[in-house]
Amino acid sequence: MITSTQAPITSTEAPVDPVDPVDFLTSLIDKLQTVFEVTRPRPKLLAKWTLFQTKLLVQYNQMHAKGCVFKTTWSDNNVNFDVVDTCQDIEQVKNAFHNWSHEFTADCSKVVRQKERNWHNRITTRNDLLFGRTKTKLGC
């Protein structure tokens, strides 16, 4: 089991804080790709994470089109983009996706009914399942 390794020369470039929210999600996928390259390439698993990212972006764009106002920049210093520590990185990326989703997928038209986070709560369950599958595949 690989737990801690220096990132290869093609390591993920850490986003300069704060960054555009969409760019931050892209950096998370890049981080996962780096982790998978260090352990062993996992194109199907990376595709599932990329699909998850796409779902978040679709919801973000739909809420933005509805007139919901979100922050224009985002930073999450909990993800270490400099070193590859497989199990810790997977956990950090999962938490970063969760935090991003909580901030940028709220439905402003449902605030009065206190249901603005329903979509986030449902997608968080999928995130947890994908995280569990990833941990199992990587032997964490």
Image (cartoon, rainbow, N blue to C red):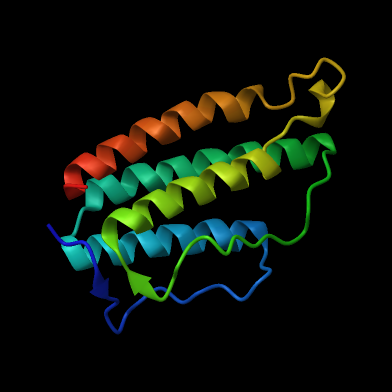
x and y, in percent, of residue 43 in the image = 23, 52
Residue 20 against residue 62 in the figure, above or below? below
Percent x, y of residue 87: 29, 54
Where 136 sits versus 91, above or below? above
| x, y percent for residue 103 | 69, 43
Does residue 57 appear anywhere in the picture?
Answer: no
Residue occupying image coordinates x 16% and y 62%: 2
Q: How many marks?
A: 0
Residue 126 figure quarter: top left
Which quadrant does the N terminus fall into? bottom left
**Can you tell which quarter of the image residue 115 is in?**
top right
Query: Is residue 47 rendered to the left or right of residue 128?
Result: left
Residue at the farthest left position: 1
Q: Residue at x 82, y 15 (%)?
A: 113
- Could you say which quadrant of the image residue 36 lies in? bottom left
Q: Is residue 65 above or below residue 23?
A: above
Instruction: Looking at the picture, tell me which residue is in the foreground, 97 or 67.
Output: 97
Q: Is residue 69 left or right of residue 92?
A: right
Most extreme residue toward the bottom is 9
Tell me what residue is drawn at x 35 percent, y 36 percent. Answer: 130
In the displayed structure, 8 sits above or below 88; it is below
Residue visible at 61% across and 26% down in the picture: 119
Residue 51: x and y, percent? 42, 42
Q: Can the viewer see residue 18 in this picture?
A: yes
